[in-house]
Structure formats: C-alpha cells, structure tokens
Image (cartoon, rainbow, N blue to C red):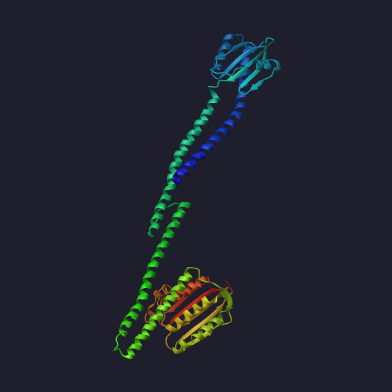
C-alpha cells in the first residue's frame, strides 16, 4: 500500500510533467508563430539594406565586407535573371533554395516569404536580381527553444525539491495522528497530539484532542459508575446476607425474626428499585427508549399523582398549596409522569413534619414552567452542583433509603423533551425545583 507521502509525490510529479509538456508545446507554437512574423520583418529589413548597399556600391571589397559581417547571423545569396548565383556569404547552415523559388521571385517581382526564407527582387543597371536571405540557425532566436526547455526543466527540478519538503511537512502531522489513534485503540485515552496549525489538519488534530478528552471523561465516568453500582448493591446484599444468617438461629425470638425479615424485605425492595432505575437509565441513555409525545392536560396529570401520593403527605401532616390552571402540553405522558412522581416523592420525603409543598404551573408563550417547592431541610450549594450525578446522595438524604438515581432519571427525561431543570435551595428553609418545558416538541 502506497503511503500518503508517496501518493502526493507521484501526483505532483505527474501533474508537473503533464503541465510542462502542454506548456512547452503551447509556448513553442506561440513562439514559432509570433517570432516567425518578427523574423521575416527583420530579414526583409536586412535584405533591403544589403540591396541598397549593393546597388550603390561599386567597390566589390565593400560588398564582401558587408557579406562577411552579415554571415555571423544571416545567409545571403544573390541570383541574376538567368538563375545563376552571383554572390553569397558563408553561413554554417542554410536552407537549400530551389530554382522554382528563384524564378518565382524574378518573374513576380515581389517579396516571397516561406518560413524563415525571404526572397527580395530588385534591379541594378537594367538587370533583374533575386536576393535570398535566411537566418543562421545556430544563432539568435533559435536558441530560445533550448532556453525555454532548460527553463522548464529547472522549474521542474526546483518545484519537485520544494514539493518533497512541503510534502514531508504535510505528512508529518498525519503520521502523528496515526500514532495517536493507535494509542487510542489500545485504550490509552490520555493521548494528545501537539499539532499547532490553522488549517484542516490543525482542525482535525484539535477535534481529535477534544474527542480523546471526552472519551477519557466517559471512561472515568464508567469506572466511577461501575464502582458506585458495586458499592450500592453490596450494601443491601450485605444486610440481607447478614440477617439471613441470623435467622438460622432457631432460638431467635419471634419478634426479632419479624424485625430482621422486615429489614430483608426493605433491602430487597431497594435492590429491586435500583435495578429498575438502572435499566431505565440505560434505556434512556441508549436513545432507543420509546418516545411517544401526545397532547394532554398537564394540570390533570399532576393532580392525579398528588392524589395517589395522598397517604404519604398526609402521614407527615403536610399542607399542599396548588396552583394548577388548565394547561395543555405536547409530551410523552408516561415519561413526564415519572418526573412528577420522583420530584413529589422527594419533596414529601425531605419536608419537615407539618410543613408544606407548593406546586405551581405557569404557561408562557412557548414554554411551560412547573415549580415544585418544599419547606424541608434544604440542600447546600456544594450538594446542588452534584445532585444530578448518578448515585450521588446529598447529606440530607444519608439517613433516607434511596438509590441516588431518581434525579438523574428526571434530568434525562427533561433533556429528551428539550427542556431544562433548575434548583434553588436554602439550608434549613427548603428547596425549589423549576422545570421548563416547550409547549410543542
């Protein structure tokens, strides 16, 4: 399998070579077409100057000297009206001139051009002549092709060397990411990549570090969750196991037996509730839990739950203050029912004897606010920051039998409904939960 570096280099070289070939042919074609016209004009000028010198010069030595000077860059040949060569200079290379071309210039008496060969007719002393002039192909503009070729070749070499260096810089952070992902695959969630760039690779590295941080937090939460579950389950199991052993004592008084059996029953209930709530949380977390929103009367739902809990709040001689105007909401009835049951049970459990519980429903334009307040023990600020953590139980509930999962379930259900929950509490005065839900999902 080819590495990214090899692929980049091969792609770059292929593109550069193709570009150079296309550029070379386009430039050559343009160069030939454009320069040919200019060279023909120069050749005509040189030829006309030579004709002027030849026509006015009676001294052959002067003509020979002019030919010698021009031979460095041009090849000249002069033909008389019979087609015989009268004079010429000696260039290294020349294009052969056909007799038909000579006669054409002599007969038509106009300038003839063919590529880089120019034929000029003129008369001297009543005789017709044809002067042919062509450039010396070893000099002048013909070297431009080689210059162009070597320029493009130099560009290729410099570009390739530069790209090899740049490609290494590009591939280096990718290799760093590969190394980090291998560490991540081994379960090392602390791995980080130190790539400080402001491009797509830098953004990828930043997101990778963010992902590993979240994975590390999840792993810590998972470990803590497993530890908490083990601890919470171990406590009632230890009680059940210990009292079951005591019950084997046949001499144990009947009254004691009943007491121990009631403890075993309570702890079993607690284990059952914990198991049920753990399954509920797992279902809600998986986002596979059935979610069936319907339109129903929220005030009626809360009123029915309060009536169902009447034996509990009456036994504590609690006063209920209700403000439940008719309110319709679009929500999952069964899920919200668990929210109100959990919050009301907590309010009853932690309220002082002969205290009060207040429930208010406030309907706004787009949201519904449900306030559940009690006159209980209150929660300290340190505990408020953690009461929604799983298995966390505030100091006020240490002596109460609970699972520490109720408020976690409440928060999760409210999040599913795109709402939020707020808590205000003063130690010794009571606690108020405010649930804010959208009227329509």
Q: Is residue 65 visible?
A: yes
Q: Quadrant of residue 402?
A: bottom left
Instruction: Between residue 47 and residue 243, name the one nearer to us.
Output: 243
Asked if residue 368 is positioned above or below residue 39 in the image, the reply reads: below
Q: Is residue 405 visible?
A: no
Tell me if 428 is positioned left or right of 140 in this view: left
Q: Is residue 19 left or right of residue 54?
A: left
The quarter of the rendered structure image containing the C terminus is bottom right
Q: Residue furthest right?
A: 108
Residue 398, quarter of the rendered image: bottom left
Q: How many marks?
A: 0
Which one is nearer the viewer's eye here, 426 or 339? 339
Query: Does residue 112 lie above or below 291 as drawn?
Result: above
Q: Is residue 3 above or below residue 101?
A: below
Nearest to the observer: residue 230 or residue 170: 230
Q: Residue at x 44, y 60 (%)?
A: 211
Expressed as whole percent of the image width and height from the top left, the position of residue 327 reads 58, 79
Question: What residue is shown at x 33% (from left), y 90% (from top)?
Answer: 254
Q: Position of residue 127 (x, y in %)?
A: 68, 10
Residue 95 percent coordinates (x, y): 59, 19
Please state the horizontal and vertical placement of residue 410, each as a whole percent of the image: 47, 75
């Amino acid at each position: 399998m080819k590495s990214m570096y090899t692929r980049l280099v091969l792609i770059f070289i292929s593109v550069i070579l193709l570009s150079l070939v296309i550029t070379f042919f386009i430039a050559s074609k343009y160069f030939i077409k454009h320069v040919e016209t200019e060279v023909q004009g120069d050749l005509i000028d040189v030829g006309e100057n030579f004709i002027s010198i030849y026509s006015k010069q009676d001294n052959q030595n002067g003509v020979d000297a002019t030919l010698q000077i021009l031979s460095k860059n041009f090849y000249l040949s002069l033909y008389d009206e019979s087609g015989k060569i009268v004079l010429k200079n000696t260039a290294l290379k020349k294009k052969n001139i056909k007799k038909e071309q000579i006669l054409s210039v002599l007969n038509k008496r106009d300038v003839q051009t063919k590529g880089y060969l120019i034929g000029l007719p003129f008369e001297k002393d009543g005789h017709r002549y044809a002067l042919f002039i062509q450039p010396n192909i070893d000099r002048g503009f013909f070297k431009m092709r080689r210059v162009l070729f070597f320029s493009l070749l130099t560009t290729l070499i410099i570009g390739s060397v530069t790209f090899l260096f740049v490609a290494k810089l590009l591939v280096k952070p990718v290799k760093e990411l590969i190394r980090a992902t291998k560490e991540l695959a081994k379960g090392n969630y602390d791995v980080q990549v130190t790539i400080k760039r402001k491009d797509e690779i830098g953004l990828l590295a930043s997101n990778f570090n963010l992902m590993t941080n979240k994975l590390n937090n999840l792993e810590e939460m998972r470990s803590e969750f497993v530890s908490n579950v083990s601890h919470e389950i171990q406590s009632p199991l230890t009680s059940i196991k210990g009292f079951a052993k005591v019950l084997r004592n046949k001499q144990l008084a009947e009254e004691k037996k009943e007491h121990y059996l009631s403890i075993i029953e309570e702890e079993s209930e607690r284990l059952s509730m914990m198991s049920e709530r753990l399954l509920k949380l797992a279902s809600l977390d998986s986002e596979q839990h059935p979610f069936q929103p319907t339109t129903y009367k929220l005030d009626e739902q809360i009123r029915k739950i309060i009536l169902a809990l009447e034996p509990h709040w009456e036994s504590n001689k609690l006063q209920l203050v209700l403000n439940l105007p008719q309110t319709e909401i679009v929500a999952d009835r069964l899920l919200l029912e668990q929210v109100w049951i959990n919050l009301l049970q907590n309010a009853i459990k932690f309220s002082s004897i002969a205290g009060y519980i207040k429930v208010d429903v406030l309907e706004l334009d787009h949201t519904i606010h449900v306030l559940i307040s009690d006159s209980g023990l209150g929660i300290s600020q340190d505990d408020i920051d953690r009461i929604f953590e799983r298995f966390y139980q505030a100091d006020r509930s240490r002596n109460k039998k609970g699972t520490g999962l109720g408020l976690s379930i409440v928060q999760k259900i409210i999040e599913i409904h795109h709402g939020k929950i707020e808590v205000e509490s003063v130690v010794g005065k009571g606690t108020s939960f405010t649930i804010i839900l959208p009227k329509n999902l």
